[in-house]
Structures are given as structure tokens and as C-alpha cells.
Image: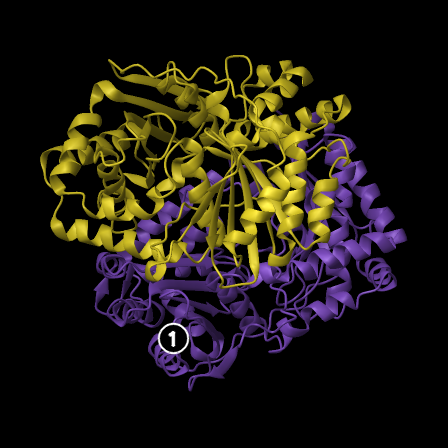
Amino acid sequence: MIARLTVTVLVATVSACASAPSNNPPPDGAPSVYETKLDNGLTVLVKPDSRAPVVVSQIWYKVGGSYEPRGLTGISHVLEHMMFKGTQTLGPNEFSRIIAANGGRENAFTGRDYTAYFQRLEKSRLEIAFQLEADRMQNLKMDPEEFAKEVEVVKEERRLRTEDKPEALTYEKFMHAAYTRSNYRNPIIGWPEDLSNLTIEDLEDWYQRFYTPNNATLVVAGDVDPEEVFALARRHFGVIPPRQVRPTDNPVEPRQQAPRRITVKARAQVPYVLLGFHVPVITLGNESDWEPYALEILAHILDGGKSARLSRSLVREQQVASSAGVGYDPTSRNSTLFMVDANPAQGKTVGEVEAAIMVQIEQLQTMLVAQGELDRIKAQIVASKVFEQDSAFAQAMQLGALETIGLPWALADEITERLRSVTPEQVRAVARKYLVPENVTVAVMQPETPGNQKKG
Amino acid sequence: MRRITNYTMLPMLLLWAGNANAALDIQTWETDNGARVYFVETRQLPMVQLSVGFDAGSARDPQDKLGLAHLVNLMVEEGAADLDGESIALALESVGAQYSNENGRDMSVFELRSLSDPDLLQPAARVFAKILSAPTFPKASLDRERQRLLIRLAQQQQSPRDVVTRAFYANLFDGHPYAKPPDGDAEGVQRIVRRDLTDFHRDYFVGANAVMALVGDLSRAEAEQLVQQVVGGLPRGRAAEKVAAVPELNGGALVDIQFPSNQSHLLMGQPGVSRHDPDYFPLYVGNHILGGSGLISRLSVAIREERGLAYSVYSYFLPMRDRGPFIIGLQTRNDQTSLAERLARETVASFVAEGPSAEELEAAKKNITGGFPLLIDSNRKIAGNLLNMAFYGLPLDYLETYSDRIDAVTAEQIRDAFRRRVDPERLVRVVVGGSNG
């Protein structure tokens, strides 16, 4: 599970939806995904899946944590909460009541590069979701009292997710140190002082600026007919006038020159270390650049299951780590981090764990990965693509995320092939190029409770 | 995996509800050695989902060795028959199979996901069978896994959510096996020796104590063969003895645990329902209105929507072999804890006194029955439902009749059931937090 470290999505309302991106080979020559663009610029993607009489509808907006300027961090996520608080015609939570009365499940999530809303319904109820989403795309009502309460809810969410979780707190501080300019340095949920200073006018501006059909993608997956979905989309979303979207600053992270290191003190029991290297992602027009795919394979070599190197070598053979993992997402709007994290084993220090991780990286730089090891990773990747088709939701997630960060959704069908073509030499090359000392940030979390493990 | 960032704040009731249109053709049989099998053939994807459950959860832990069930659950993949742990991991992963395991209070569960291509499925199934039937519990692995478990237990002590959960079950089920934490405790884990694992496996990992769910791209004949291969080698043995009945609470309790967090985590509740409880349906539908329907539940409206006091506030009945808990939960900034607790108590008390309105009941039924198809829309979800049906011995038409049973619930039944089963004056309440600074 490569995604374990990527704390990039906040699920805003109630239950969570956890799902990895998925991918489908087109069955028997039929297109696996149907696409249209409405006159007002709304992109509509439909992925038929007739296994069960259900449908998932997701609307994705190109806005999220990485769009936010200084002083307004967290605004995309607060707006996402406010989207449940009523429109010109619906009262607070009425959206949720209507979906519930139709047997639906719904939620929303905010990431670094997107904000998305979804409903899961019996298939005949799809139009209800469209009606409601089209309404709140244009008619949101910001009530000052609702806003005042909801900011407090978000502050509780921040305490729950970050402030009272030593490793999440470490991750937040780590990101702020690893990036100096990129907006990825700020937490999606926002800095506390920004949440306190946020005004309803800020939110209204943010809503007007980004919630427009030409800045959105509608994704539908399930037991539906694509043409009928397109017609429904035209009826409900097609009438919404587009607006020019004024982009926000998206600073490029300058090349790192020297290692960075921070220490975090937290009321914890078990130390923790987190390393990150700046690495490229798949970019539009350069989808065939092999480096991100080689990095993804590298992530699997280290953490693609129990037979992978971190688990085998660090956890079981050397017993220097009690757990260890990798995080890398090659599909992000901006260049990102290749991260490795670990807890030391009993009697070991974070320093020893860090050194053991660096030895693993050196091996990747000096020795070619064996063909058998690579074959095993590719077998896992191929199988997991099939397993992912077991979830229509996950399939819709991948299409929506790709489209929203500015990559063609068709990449979903190509990634597996590109991963399969990665060579041992390419893996070694990215290890040599990116996993180097001047490109690293290390965060160490040391418990400040007395009487715990020795310092690292 | 160990560190997936899990943001599921709400422990939602695992409702494996029934299908009004009976879309699932459930086939069931018993193996020669006594394992109950539930099978659904699905041909759309070339994959197979296998789940095996044993009545061998933490309720079976010896009182002085809490964590034994968990360690057995973790250790079976560390060596089996002629294979060491490395060979097991390599064999499964080289055919793209995914193995997972989970230990609860009632059940110890093992799952295998594989492509249905026999060249891939067969080797994975062979290894899976060895893991279940012939684990070797190597000493070196035991020492290592014990240490890793101790570190995880230490990590739980830095999480107010884990601390409050542990304390809540300990107080609610004081003296009953459900008080035992599924992950064990440090003292117990340190006392466990290899012999404990082999004895536990011998007693509980037997055909008569096993259930199996199978979903995927297989014919009935292929399924039978696969089942035989995976659990056929287990000795018949005996089903585990029934867990003792959960006793009534003598009275309410207030437990406060100081913890250096910004929020206080509150859990309160009472013993709730078993899987076969005659009040299950009225209580389930009623709780949906009280605290089981997300933002629009009464608890969420009172505490989150009207006051902004919490991000997550909920209630649920967790049905188990015997009576599982009825739980009300929330987290709030330390200085708001008393207010949030008072509002939660008032909300529960008024619901118990008055029951639901006609509109609330209608909306809840529509949500539950209308959402039924979503509960069986993937192989994985179907397998989860089948495993529960098999383990708890529910009738084969349970899914088919589910929606009708929801629809049949009346407001009076809900009020009556809540009055008899939930006493707002007699709640076990645990708060963890309050000492930040």
C-alpha cells in the first residue's frame, strides 16, 4: 500500500471514503469511459459498470489546499463544509436529508489539488444528485451564524486529526520544512490563526471564484447509460453560466541545495522518523517521461507488501524498525515528495532507523534490482488493477483526480502499461538522481514524556 | 497495512442488510469437517474473494494472557508446514494475491484475494491453506512480533481515542470476556509463550469452529474444491463454548482519565444487543434517527449543527455473539466537555421518552431500505456480509427479508424497545482528556 503516508485528503463531513485510485482495461474494444464537454465547459465522464443497480456521482472542482495564498489556508476545506449549509431554496442540511430520504450515502473531501462531493445511490436516483449539486454550484447561501459554528467544527476537526496525533503533527511540520515556496507546505485543514481570521466575505469570494462549471468535472460510475447521463447533465448543469476563473499563485518549489532537519517534541510514547525527497510527477504533455513511473516502481520495491525490502530487511531481518513505509503519488498538480517513514524497534533509536533506510537507498543506487523482484512487483500491480475494479467508487475517484489535476483521464488506462515497462536501470537512475543527501528533509519526533525510549 | 491514515471517525454500524430483490444467489453447505460455507458466484471480474472466520477472537483470551488471540492471528503467516515466513510472503505476492487478517472480540478473520486464473489462484490457495492449518509459530518470529505488538500498544497509549475505547469496554463489560481488548495488553503479551499459541490454534482453528465465505469467478464445483483445499485439512474439533451472557449493569459509572490532549474524548453507553436479539430491528432503526445517520441525526444536530461543539458525534449498537455495546461518542475541546455531555444525555433521554416522530421514522426507513443495493455492490462487500451470516448463524433469507423487517418497524416498537433497553440514568461514561497544558 503505497499511499499510506499521503495525508492529502480531508473527508469533511461524516463517514470516510477510503479508496485507492483504480484503473480499467477497456472490455472487448468498447470504450471504458465516455466523455463529453458541455457548452459551459463542464467536463462529464461516465464509466459504465453494470455489476450492481447502483451509481456514484462525483463533482470535482479545481481548487484545494495548493490554491490557497498566505493567510487563507484552510479556506477550500471550510467552504466544502459550508456547501452543506443551504442554498437560496434549501435550508441547512436539507441537501443531506433529501439524499438520505432517497436511500443515498454522501460526503465530500478536500485535497491539496481538488475539492469533491459525491453521492452513492440506487441507479434510478441519479437525477436527484444532479439537481442538488447543480443548485449548490450556483446558489450557495452563506449564513453568518452557520459560518461561525462551522469554523468551530473545523477547529475541532483540526484538533482531532492533527493536534492530538503526534505523528500527524510531525507530518504537518515536516511538510512546512520540506517545502519553502510551494503551497504544499501548508496543511489542507489550514493553520489555526488563518482559521480564526477567516471571514464570510473571504468564503463568498472563494466560492464565486472557483465554483463554476468550466472549473469542474462531473464523474459518474455505475449501472447507467452514458447518453442518458449526458442528457441529464445538460438539463441540470448545462444552464449554469460559466465564469472566467482567475488563477491563484502556484509557486514552483526551488531546487533544494542542502539537507534539512527538524525535531518535533510531542506528548507521545513511540519515536518516529519521516524522510522526504523532492521528486517529479507526471506532467501534461510529458506523460511518457519515465521518471515518475520508475519512482513508483521504486516505492513498490521498498514497500510493495511484506516481501518488499523495508518490511523484509528493516522490520524482520535487522529488526531495527517496528514498522516502515513509503509514500509517493506520481499524480499531483505540483512536484511532490518521495517519503519514507518508520518507528524504531524496541531498543533502537530513530538515528539507527534513519541510517538503515539510507543503506537501503544506497543499495538501490549501486545495485540493479533483480528481475525476479521486479516481476513480482509487476504481478502485484497487474492483479491490483483487477481488484480495484471491484469498487466503482475507486474507479470514479481515479478519473476525477486525474482530470482535476490537469492530466488526461485516459492515463488511468495507460499507467499500468508504463509501470510494466520500467527497467532495472531506470530504477537505479532515479535513485541516484533524487534520493540524495542535498535533496532530503528529515523530521524526527521525540516523545517528551519522561521515562520513554532513549533518544535517537 | 499498519499505517494507512485512517480517517474513519465514525465507527459505523456494519449493517449487512438484505436485498429486497434477492439479487444474490447464496449457496451454502457444510464441509466434512464441520465448516459452514457461504458462496456467491460472480462472473464479471476475474477474481476470487475468500474469507475464513474462526470463533477465536479476544473473548477467548486467558485473563492473564490478554493478546493471545491477536498474536495467533498475527503469527500464522510467519511460518507454516514446510514454508518459512519469507517463503509465504514471496509465494503470495509473486502471484499478485493479497492476504489480510483481522482480530476482533468474537472472530479471528483471514482473507485472501486472488485473480481467478488457476495458475495464480492455486498456488495462493495452497499457501493460504497451510497458514490456517499448519502454522509453525517460529520462536524468532514470535519474539519479533511480540516486540512489535508492544510498540503498537505503546502507540495506542498516545491516542486519546484508543485510550477511551479501551477504558469504555473495560468498564462496560467489567468481568465479562468482552472487556478484553482485541489487541491485548502489555503484561499479557509479555507472558505469552509459544506453547500458548500452539494450544490456542489446536483448540480453536478447527472445522467445527470455522466459517467461510467465498465470492467470485468460480463454479459451484470449483468453489467446493477450493473450500476443501483451504479448510478441508483442519481437524473437525469442536465449536468453541458459548461466551457467558453479558450481565446487566449494576448502575451507571463516571470514569475520568487525565490525558494531555486538546480535546476530550467521550464514550458512554450500556450493553446493547446480540445478533439474534428480538429488539434488534426497532433498536437499529431508532438509533439511525438518534445517532446513526450522520449529520442529520438528532445527536449531530444538537451537538454539531446547532452548537459547533464537535466534528464527530454518533451512536450505534454493535451487535455481537452475545450483547455488544450501545455506544454514544464525541470529541470536543476540553473546556466544552461538560456542555457536550449534558446535551448528549438530554438528547438520548428525550428520544427514550418520546420515541421518533412519524416523519423521522419514515425518513429513516427510506434511507435504510433505499440504500440496500449499496451494501452488496462489490465482491468484497458481499463476502463480508456472507461471513457475518455464516458466523452468527443467520437464516439464509436474512438478506431477502431484511428490508421488509425494517419497513415493519413502528414508532411504538422503537419507543418501547428504547424504554426497556436504554436507561439514560444508568450509563457508563468515560472521558479521556482535560489536562492539556
**Label 1: chain letter:** B
Q: How many marks?
A: 1
Q: Is residue A342 above or below residue A143?
A: below
Drawn colour of chain A?
yellow
Q: Residue at x 62, y 46 (%)?
A: A106
Q: Is residue B279 above or below residue B350?
A: below
Q: Residue at x 35, y 29 (%)?
A: A274
Coordinates of residue A134 in the picture (x, y in percent): 64, 38
Name the kind of residue labelled 1 in the image: Leu
Coordinates of residue B230 in the picture (x, y in percent): 35, 74
Q: In terms of depth relative to the viewer, which is nearer, A124 or A390?
A: A124
Quadrant of the frame with the C terminus of chain A: top left
Coordinates of residue B104 in the picture (x, y in percent): 52, 58
Chain depicted in purple = B
Q: How is the image coloured?
A: by chain
Q: Is residue B114 above or below residue A176?
A: below
| Residue B101 is at least partly visible in this image | yes
Residue A12 location, quadrant: top right
Label 1 secondary element: loop
Q: In terms of depth relative to the viewer, which is nearer, A8 or A413?
A: A413
Report the residue marked by disc 1. Answer: B218
Q: Is residue B211 left or right of residue A123?
A: left
| Residue B422 is at least partly visible in this image | no
Q: Is residue A447 left or right of residue A84?
A: left
Residue A149 location, quadrant: top right
Coordinates of residue B244 in the picture (x, y in percent): 64, 69
Q: Is residue A179 above or below residue A159?
A: above
